Image (cartoon, helix red, strand yellow):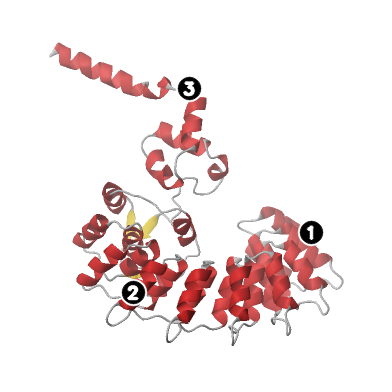
Amino acid sequence: MEVTRGASKRQRTEAKHALEVLPGSAWSLVLKKLSPYDRVTFGLTCKTFLEAVTTANPEEKKKALPLRTDLTNKRLYEKMPCFSLDWFQWVFRSFERRKGESKKWRNGESSSYLYDSDLMHLAAFQGSKKAVKWLVSQGIPLDIKHKYCHGVGAARGAAAGGHVELLEWLRSEGCGFDEETCSAAAYGGRIDVLQWLRSQDPPCPWDMYTCCYAAEGGHLDVLQWLRSQDPPCDWDEETCAGAASGGHLDVLKWARSQDPPCPWDEVTCEGAARGGPLEILQWARSQDPPCPWGSRTCFVAAHGGHLHILQWARSQDPPCDWHELASLAAAAGGHLDVLQWLRSQNPPCPWNPEECKRYAANRHPKVLKWIQENS
C-alpha cells in the first residue's frame, strides 16, 4: 500500500512540473506553430496552457474573446479542418448548444455557442461521415438547413469541401440537394463535384448564384464550365459583383468579354470598393460605357476603411456621389482617418454627429472623442 501511495505522489509531482521540461521561450515557439483550429482545445486543457496560448498570440489576447476558433466560411475555404469525432463529441457535450439553425446572418461575429446546423455543416465540409452519423444519432436531422441561406447543411458542406463519396452516401440516405449545393461547390472551386451533381437523374438544380459564387471565389475555370453547358447556367449582375468583391479582375474581364457580356450594375463598383483592389474599380469605370456607380460605392469604401479608394472615387469628374451614411460608416467601423478626411473636404461629406457618436460609443473611443470635439 505504501508503494502505491508513493507512486501516486511521484506521478502528481511529475505532472505538476511537466511544463518545466521546456523553458518558457520554447513553449512560446511551440504554441506559435499551433493550428488556429486547435487553440481553444489546447487552451482549455489547463490554466497554464490557457495563459501560454494567449501569451503566444498577443494580438488575440487584447480582444474581448481572446480564445476563439474561427469557423467562418472564409477561414474554412482557406484551410480544411481535420477535427476528430472526439472533438465533435466534446463540443456537442461541453459547450452551449442551440438547436436548429441561425435565423440571421452572423457576419463572422464570435459567439459562445454553436447551432446544430454549424456542427453538421462542419462535419460534412471536412468529409467526416463518422461525425455526420454521430450527430444524426444525437437527434440532429441530416437535412437540417444551414444559416440563413436555407441550403441543406450536410449537402452544402460536402459539396464545398469536395467530397463526392459523402454526397453519394447522403443521397442514399434521402438527404436532399438544392441550388445551394451547386453554389457551394462553385465557391469552393469543386468542378468535379459540380459535374457529378449535374450528372444525376434528375440533375441537382442550380441558379444564377452558382455563377456568382464561382466568380466570387475566383474560379474562372468553373465559371467557364458553367457557361459552356447546354443550356448554360444562368447568370446576372451578381456574377460581376461577385468577381469584383472577391478581387478577381481576370474573372470580371472574362465575364464582360462574352457575347452578350455578363450584365453589371452599381453593385459591381460597390463590390470593388468593399474588398477588391483599386484597379478593379478603375477598370470598371474605364469601360465604354463605364460601369455605373452611386453613393453606396463611397459608403462601403468608408466602412471598410479603404481611404485610397474613397479618395480616387471622389477625385473623378464628376466625383462619385456620397451622403451622410459614408460618415456614419467610417465612425461605425472605427476608421478615424477616413472620417477626418471626409469632414475635411470642401464641402465636407454630410454627417449626423449624434448618429455617428451612437455608433462609435461602445467600440471606438478615439473616434467618439474626435466627434465630440468637432461637432
Question: Quadrant where the N terminus lies?
Answer: top left
Residue 175 seen by the camera: yes
**SS category of the residue bearing label 1:** helix
User: Which residue shows up at 57% across the image and 43% down it?
Assistant: 59
Q: Quadrant of residue 126?
A: bottom left
Labels 1 & 3 near each other (Cβ < 8 A): no
Camera-near label (2 vs 1) is 2
Q: Is residue 319 left or right of residue 221?
A: right
Which of the pair 177/1 is nearer the observer? 177
Outermost residue, left side: 1
Of the numbered discs 2 and 1, the one sitting upstream in the chain is: 2
Q: Which residue is mark 3?
A: 23
Q: CA distance from mark 1 to mark 3?
A: 50 Å
> As shown in the figure, which amino acid type bears the numbered disc 3?
Pro
Eyeballing the image, is 250 above or below 86?
Answer: below
Q: Position of residue 15 (x, y in %)?
A: 32, 23
Q: Which residue is mark 1?
A: 373
Which of the pair 297/7 is nearer the observer? 297
Q: CA distance from mark 2 to mark 1?
A: 59 Å
Q: Position of residue 178 (x, y in %)?
A: 34, 78
> As shown in the figure, which amino acid type bears the numbered disc 1?
Glu
Q: CA distance from mark 3 to mark 2?
A: 53 Å
Residue 209 seen by the camera: no
**SS category of the residue bearing label 2:** helix
Q: Position of residue 112 (x, y in %)?
A: 41, 54
Q: Which residue is mark 2?
A: 197
Outermost residue, top side: 2
User: Which residue shows up at 53% across the image and 40% down it?
Assistant: 57
User: Which residue shows up at 41% across the image and 39% down it?
Assistant: 43
